[in-house]
Amino acid sequence: MGKEESPQAARRTTRASCAAASNGEVGRSTITPLHNPTVSDLAFGGEPLSSEDLRSSFPARRPQILELVHLLGPHSSPMLPLFVYGGASTGKTTVILQVFRHLNRPFVYASCRTCYSPRILFESILNQLLLHRKNEANGYSSAKRCEKPSDFVNFLREDVGKVVDSLKDHSGKRKSNKSRRWPKGDILYLIIDNLELVREWDKSSSLLPFLFNLYDILKLPNFALIFVSSSSPDTYYSSMGYIEPIPVFFPEYTEEDLRQLLIRNQANQKLYSCFLDIVLRPFSRVTRRLDELSTVFSSLFQKYCEPLSDTSLFPNDEMKRRLFSHFRPYISPALNEIFWGPSQCLSGIESGKVTRQRGSIRKHEDNEDFTEIGFHMSTAAKYLLISAFLASRNPATLDASLFDSTGGSDNRKRKRKASEKSMEQKETVEQESLMKGPGTFPLERLLAIFQCITSVIDVSIDEEEHGDGFSTDGGNSSWLMSNVLSQLSSLCDANFIAKGGSCPLEGSTRYRCTISEDFALKVARSIKFALPNYLCRR
Amino acid sequence: MLLSLVQSLCSSSLSSSSPTFKSKSALPSSKHSETPPSPSSSHKEPKTAVSPFQPRPHPEAITLPFSRLTGSGSIETREVHSAVAFVSARCEWLLDGKQNKGLKLKRKKTESGLVPTHLALGSCHRGGATSGFTVSEFTPAGKLLVPSGSSSKGLHLHCCCCMEPFTILHKASSRKTDKISTGTGKSRTTRRIDLTASLPASTDISDVNAAESNERHYSNMRMEAFEAVWSITESSIKDVLREANATIFSEIHEWVRDSFDTIVSFGVPNFHEATQPFPVVKDATSKKIFTGLVLTRNLEFVDDLMTFEDLKQHLKSQGCHVANLSSVDFSSRNGVGTCLRSLLGQFLTGSLDTADISMLATWYKEQQNNDNPVVIIIDDMERCCASILSEFIHMLSEWVLKVPVILIMGVATTVDAPRNVLPSNALHRLHARKFTFQSLPEKMNYVVETAFLKQSSEFTISHKTAVFMRNYFAHHNGSVTSFIRALKIACAQHFSTQPLCFILHWCLRDEDNEVPQSHTYGLSQERMLKLACDLPSWKSTSNQITQLSGETLLDGLTQLKKLHKTWRMVVLCLYEAIKGENVQLLDLMCEALDPKGPFGSQFDNGSRVLPRDNSMSQKSHSLEKNKSLINRAIRRVKELPANQLLVLMKAWEKHTVDVPELHSEVKALVLSVLKLEEDGESLNQNKVEMTNTRRQALRGNLNAADKNSRVAYEKASNLVDSMVRKYVCPVECVALHEVLCFDSVDKLQAALIGDTRRRIQIDLQEFHAIIRCSCCSKRGSTILPSMPDSSIMYTLAQEHGDVVNVHDWYQSFKSVVLSTHMVSKRGKSRSKQHPPTPKKRKTTNELSEPSEASIQARFCKAIVELQVTGLVRMPNRRRPDYLQRLAFGS
Amino acid sequence: MAVQSHARDAQNLLRSRLCNPSFVFKALSGSPDSNYSKLKFILSSSVTEACNNSLLLLGPRGSGKTAVLELVLNDLLEEYPDMISVIRLNGLLHNDDNCAFKEISRQLCMEHHLLFSKMASFDDNSQFLIAMLRECGLAHKTIVFVLEEFDLFAQGKQRLLYSLLDAMQSITSQAAVIGISCRLDADQLLEKRVRSRFSHRKLLFLPPSTEIIERLLQHILLLPMDSTLPNDYATQFNTKLESVLADERFKEILKNYLSSSSTINHLLRFLFVAVSSIDVKSGYPSLDNFKTALSSFRRQPKQECIKDCSILELYILTCIRRLESKEQKSYNFNSVMKEYKSIHDQFQTSDDYARNVCLRAFERLLQRDLICFSDNRGQGQSVEFRPVKCLISHFELQEGIKAYRSCPIILTKLLDR
C-alpha cells in the first residue's frame, strides 16, 4: 500500500536496486549469506529518512504520522500497545514502516497474512529476534520449534531480554562506531500486521485474547506492541476484554487526497489533471480505494491519450474537448467493469494468434456450440447439465407433470399445470428463488430427468447425426450409462454443479446447479433442445 | 506383498458381491497364492493406503505387468491383479476423501492405458465412487463411476474387458483358462481364448509342450508386433499434438518475459531487503500479479494435463523456474499451507516441516541467476477452493516484488470463470492476459489424420467402429485422450483376436517382395495360409482360387496395402479440399469408410470393376440430397477461386507423391493452374519493379486468366471425380482386409462403456448363468436356499416397496436359509463342483443347523453387499428400522 | 535547545512511570484498609504461620489486581528472602491441565535449579508437584501460585485447581493459591469438590474514588525535584501542570473520559496519550494535550466506517435498511439488488451500476464489518445467496449519512421513508 512514494524515494530505490545488483554479484561469487546478522538488522536499514522527506512523501497522511511519532515518543522510552486501523490500502503498513525508518528504531514485523498459522507466526517472530534466517544452509528450518502460546511467551521473554541487552550496550558505546547505523534506543517494537485475519484462524479464538494481553503477560518494560488491522477495534471487543490498545485511525482518502496521490509521479501532470477532472469524480463514487483506482486509471489514461501525438504538451481547451469526446464512450463500461485483465487483452494487445483462433471457432462445424458456449462439452454433458438446471429450477413436485411417461411431449397439459402452480405460489417462489437460489436435488432425480429428456430427443438425434443411415450401437441408443455419471463429476469440477459433501455410500449426496439461466439456454440451443418448454414459469 | 495384494483384491471383491467373488476366486492368480485369503491382510492393505504418508504408487510399479505381459501365464496374471489390488487400495482412500493423492496418481497415469482401468476397478470395489473425482479421463472403463452404487459386477466386467488384451494372451497358454469362465466379462474372455487357443489344438495335438512353447512364442511375437505398431502410432500422435501447441507456447513464453521485465522495472530488492519479513515499499500497481488465463476450451481437462506438463517443460527449457500446482493443492480441507508446501517442495530441497513464502524469497535470492521469473502453473482453476486460492493470491502479491511470480491458470470453461470463482479483492490483484489453446475439434483432426491417414502402420478400423468411436467421442467423453485410449484398446483387441495380425508388423517393415515370415511368429506357413483363406473376405471374393499359395497371398496383401494407401491419400486430398469449412475429418473418414455407402457399393466386394458413369452420376445426384461431405468436397474443388485452387493442388501434389499415376495427373493439373496463376506471379514481379506498368499487365493477365481458367477447372473436376471413383475404396471391400482392419464394435463398446446398476440387478437374478449351477437355473420363481445370499436378499426385497422393514426381511431370509436342511444332500453334492460362499460354510458343519448368529452374520454381509452395490440405502435416523431401496425394475 | 532536551527527558520519565504499574500503585499502598495491606497480611501470615491460604482477587480489567499482587510479592520477597517461591500461571496460556502442570514443574525446576525434562508426562509432573510441595513444606518455604485469568482455569475438568487445593489440605504442604479474575462470579464456576476445598476469601478491586484519582494524577504527573532535570524547569513544569489540573475544563474532560470506564489503567492510557502529545518545542504540558487525548479515545468506529464507505456502498446499506424496515426477516445480495434496482426504476438516480460492481461493494461492506453473514451454513454457496444481517442501527446509519460530505440527498430521503 505504499503508493505515497516521493520522487526522492523513487531515486533512492533505483540507487538501492543497482546497489542490490552489485550485492547480488557478491552473493553469486560467495554463496554464503552476505554478512553475519547483527542487532542492527532489526532496524529498517537503508538510508536515513529525514522528517521533511517523511512528511512530503505522505501528503495525505500528515496527522497520522504526527500522532505515531508522538506516541512512539523519544527513543528508549516505553510505550503502551498501539492499535493502528483503517480500511485496506490506506497506507497503514507503509506509513508505519517509513516512520520506523525515519526514527531508526529496532522492530520486529510479522504479517498474519504471510504467517498463516500461529506456529509460523511465533517462529518467524522468534527467528527475527534470534537474527536467524531460514536458508539453504539450515535447510529452511526455523531456530526454535514453537507451537503453544505458553512456549512462545517463555521464548519471547529470554530472547527479547538478550536483544535488549545487546541494544543497551550498543547504545552505550554508540559513539564509538559511527560507521554502521545502530538502531536508536533500547525498546524493541513488535509490529503485528493484518490482525483481522487472525479472527478466521481458529474458531476457538484463544489466540486473539492472547495477543491482546501479550503486553501485560510479558511485563517487559522494553517491549512495545503495535497491532495493524484493517477492521476497527470494536470488531474485536468479544476477545479483547476492556484493555484496549491506544487506537490510531487511518481514514480512507478523500477525493482531494486521491487527486494529490494519483497526480504524483506523472510525466505530464497538467494532462493527467485534465484526465482526473473527467474520471475521478464518477469513479470515487464507486470506490475510493487507491489501488483499484490507480489500476483502472492507468489503463484508462492510455485510452485518453490515444488521439495525442505526443503526451508531453499542455492541453488547451478545445483539445480537452476533443479528448473528452473521444474518451467519453470508455467511461461507463469502465465504471461497470471490475476485472481488468482479459478485457484489456481483448482490446487489441493480443497478437493475431487468438483472433485467428476465434475465426476458426466461428467457422466451426458445431459452431453454435463454440460461438455461444465457447468451449467443448460432450453432448451427454450438455444434456446432463440441462437436466441438472431443470432439477434445480423446477420444484420437484412438478416433475411428474413436466416429464410424464410421454416425455413431456404434450405441451398443453404441462403448460396448464405449470401455470396453475405458478399462479398460486408466485411471489413465494420468487422470494424463494431470490433467497435460496437454485434448489438442491438428489442424484436419482437428476438421472430420472436426464432419461426423460434423452428419451425425447433420442429419435431426433438419431437421424440428425447418422445421416449415413447407420444406427450406432451404444452411441446413444441408451444414453444413461456410467459414462454419463462421470460427466457429472466433470460438471461438478467445472463449478456448474455444486455438490453437497456426504458419504457416497449413503447416497444422500445432494447437488445444486449453479449456472445462470441464459447460459443454460445457450447450451440448450447448442443441442437444439427446447428448454423453455420445460421450465415452470413463475 | 504380492500375495497380500492379491488377497486384498479377492476379499475386497468378495465384499462387493458374491458373483464377482466366485468368478474372482477361480482366477489362477489366487489359485497360485496357496494361502487362503485372510481378512486381516486384506484389511491391512486399504488401511495402510489410507494413511496419508503412503508413498504414491509409481507408474512403473503398475505398468510393469503390461510391459512384461508376455511370458508364462499365472505370474503375470498375478502381477496384473496385484497392480489392480495395488491401485484399488489407493482408490479405497480416494473414496476416503484423500482425493489429492488419487489425482496426483491420475496425473502420472495419463500415460499408461492400463493402470487407470485398475484405478476404476479399485474405486468401484468400494462401490459407487461418487463423483468426488473424475475417473473419466483415466480410461473408458473408468466410466464406472456410478455415484450411488456401481455394479461391482459390471465393474469386474470392465476390468476384464480392459485387461483382456493383456491378460488373455498368456491365459491362452496357461491351461487353466476354462476355469476362468464366470462373469460375462470372463465368459467373453473364454470365447476369445478358444478362438486363439483352438489354433494349436487344430494343428498339432500330438505334443502339448511344443504347442505350449510355440504358442507362448507366438503370443510373445504378437505382443511385440502390437507394441511396435502401437508405439509408432502413439508417438506420432504425441508429436503432432506437441507441435500443434508450439506457437501458443512461444507466445506464452514471450509474455512471461515481458511481464518479468515489468516486475523488475519496479526495482530489484537486494538479498537483505528481499529476506526481510516486511514488504518492500513500492507503488500500488506493483502489487499486481501477472496472470495468464489459458483457456483450454474443453470441459474435460485430461488432455490439458499433458499440455501443461509440456508447457512446464518448455518454460523450464527457457530457464524459468516453473512449479506446477493443481486444484488438489487448493482443497479447502487443509488450508493454504498445503499449496505452499507443494509449491516449495518443487523448488526447495530437503523436507520442510513448515512452509511459508519467505522461504521462497530466500531460495530465489540464493539462486545463481536472479534474472528468471518464477512461473506457477495452476492446471485447473475452476476446481480450486476459492477461499484458499484467493488467500494464496494475496500472499503472492505481498511478495511479488521480492519473488517475481507469474501465474498461469488453466481455465476450462470461459474467461468469466475467475470472476465467478474469486472474490473481487483477490481479483483486482491479478493483471490477467488471455491465451487460448487449440479447440478440441482441431486437435481431433490432427489425431485422426496422423492415426489413420498419415500413419505408417497399416492398422485401421472398420466403418462401424469408426462411427461408434465418433459418436462415443461426440456424445460421451469429449477428450482426445480417451479417444486415443479407445483406439489403443481397439488396436490391442485386434492383435489379441486376429491371428494374422502380425502381418501388420510385416507391413511395417515393408518387405513387399517376400511372403511374411510367419514362422518367425511361431506360426507355420501352411497354418498362416489356412487362416488366410478362412478369412470371410477372401472366401467371398476369390472363390475360384480354392487354395491359395504364398504368392497369391503376397500379392493379395500388396494389393490390399496399395488400395489402402491410395484410399488414405484420396481422403487426405478431399479433406484438404474442404479443410476451410471446418469439417471434422472423422466424419469424412466415416463416410469414406462406408462399404455400403455410394462409394463402397460400387466395388462389388473387392474385385474391382469400373462402375458405369451414369450409375455414378445418379448416385452422386442422390447423394446431393443427403449432403455427403465427399460431394461437398468435389463441389468445392469445382468452384474454388484460382489462387486457392493452386494452393490446394500444391497440397495434393505433396500428398500424392507415392502414388505415381495420380501424382502425374495432379502435376499436370498444377502446371495448367500455374499457367493460369502466373498473372499473380507477374503481379508480384511488377510490384518489385516499376508500378506504372502494372495496370496494363493486369488487364492483359485478366483476359488470359478467364481463357485458360475454364480448362483448368474442368481438368480439376475430372480429376476429383476420377479420384473419388477409382480410389475411394473402403477397406472393408478389399480381400484380406480383416488383417488390417479391426471390426468388432461390441467388444470395443463393452470395453469402453460401463453398465449401471441395472447390470447388478440382472446378475443377481440370473446368477445361475454365472455360477454354472444346475438346480438354480431350473428353479422357477421359487427361492432356493442354495442361492447366494445376496441374490436371496435381493429377490426377497423385490416383494417390498421402496422401503424394506429390516426385521421382516431378516425373518423371510432366515426362513429361506433354514429350509436348506431338507435339501442339504443336494446342496452338498452340488457344493463339490461349485462352492459358493454360503455353502462352503455349510459343507464344514453340514448336518448341524446354522446358528442364529451365523445367519445374522450372513444377513448383515448380504445387506452390506447390497448397500455397497448401491441397491439399498442404510436406515437413517428418522426411520431406524427401514432400509430404502434405491434401484428399481431392471 | 535546552528546554527541548529537558522536555524530552521529562516526557521519557513520565512515560516510563505510566508504563510501570508498580510505581503507580505504590501511591495507593499506604492506607491500612487498602487491598495492598489486606493482601500483604494474608500472604505474610501464610509465610510466617505456615498456614495454607487461597483467595481470589476480583475486579474489572485494569483495576490493578496484578500490579498490587506484584507489589506485595516483591515486598515479601525482600522481607523474607528465599522463603517464598512464586509460580505464575495464566489462564490464557495454560488453560489445559497438562501444559499447566508442565509449566508449574518448569518454574519449580528453575526456582530450585533442578533439571527440567520436557518429556515428563502429566502424572510425572503432578507427582513432582506434590513432592515439591512436601519438600518446601518441610523446609518452611511457601509456594505462592498465582493464577491469572482464574475463570479460564475453571473451564473443563478443573484438575489443576483440584490437585492444587487438594494438596493444600495436607499439613505438610505450605502454599497459597491466588486467583485473579475479572469475573466477579469466578468462585461460582468451581466444581463442588473444588469449591469445598477453596477458602472463599475474596478481595474486590473497586474503581478509584475521585480523590484517589487526584492523588494519582499528582503522584504520576508531577516531576520530582530531586532528579537529573534542572530544578527551574521542573518547578515551571509542575506549576503549569498544577494549573491545568486545577482547571475546571480539565476536570470536565476527565469526568467525560472516565464516564465510560473508570479503571486506573484506563486513566493511565489517557494520561499516556496526553503526555506523549506534549509538544517538545514549547516543552510544557497544556490543556490541549488532554483534549487531543480525549479526542483520540472518543472514537465511533461505525461512524468512521460509514465515512469511509463509497457512495455506492451507502446505497447498498440504505437498501438493506429499507428491507429491514419492510420487516423482511432475512435477505441476501439478490434481494438487496432487487431493492436497489427498484430504487433506480423509481427515482432514476445517477449512479446505477452493474451487478458485479455492486457485488464488489457488497463484499467491501462485508470486509468493513458493516454487514455480516447471518449464519455459517452454506459455505459452499456463493456470496449472493447467503443471507446477511446488518451490524449498524438505523440511527447510526442516519447519523453517518448526515455527516457524510457530498452525499446524495436522495439517500437521506430513501432512508427516512
Image (tube, coloured by chain):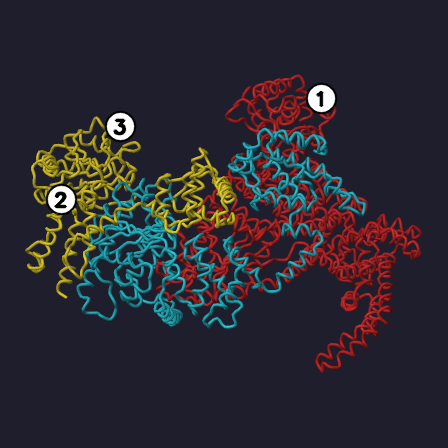
Which color is chain B depicted in? red
Query: Which mark's residue is nearer the viewer, 1 or 2?
Result: 2
Q: CA distance from mark 3 to mark 1?
A: 68 Å
Can you say whether C57 is above or below A269 in the image? above
**Amino acid marked by disc 2:** Phe
Which quadrant of the figure has residue B15?
Answer: top right
Q: CA distance from mark 1 to mark 2?
A: 96 Å
Q: Relative to the observer, which residue lies in front, B199 or C10?
A: C10
**Circle 3: element type:** loop
Q: Chain for mark 1?
A: B
Q: Which mark is residue B150?
A: none
**Residue on which the image places disc 1:** B781
Question: Where in the figure is residue A471, as x and y percent of width and height?
Answer: 78, 43
The answer to whether residue A186 is visible is: yes
Q: Relative to the observer, which residue lies in front, A327 or B846?
A: A327
Question: Where in the figure is residue B418, as x and y percent of width and height?
Answer: 52, 51
Can you say whether A302 is above or below A85 in the image? below
**Amino acid marked by disc 1:** Ser
Which color is chain A depicted in? cyan
Q: Which chain is yellow?
A: C
Dot 1, crowdedness within 10 Å: few (<14), some or many (≥20)?
Answer: few
**Residue on which the image places disc 3:** C191
Which quadrant of the figure has residue B195?
Answer: top right
**Residue on which the image places disc 2:** C25
The answer to whether residue B534 is visible is: no
Pointers 1 and 2 in contact (C-beta within 8 Å): no
Q: Chain for mark 3?
A: C
Q: Relative to the observer, which residue lies in front, A199 or B795?
A: A199
Dot 2, crowdedness within 10 Å: few (<14), some or many (≥20)?
Answer: many
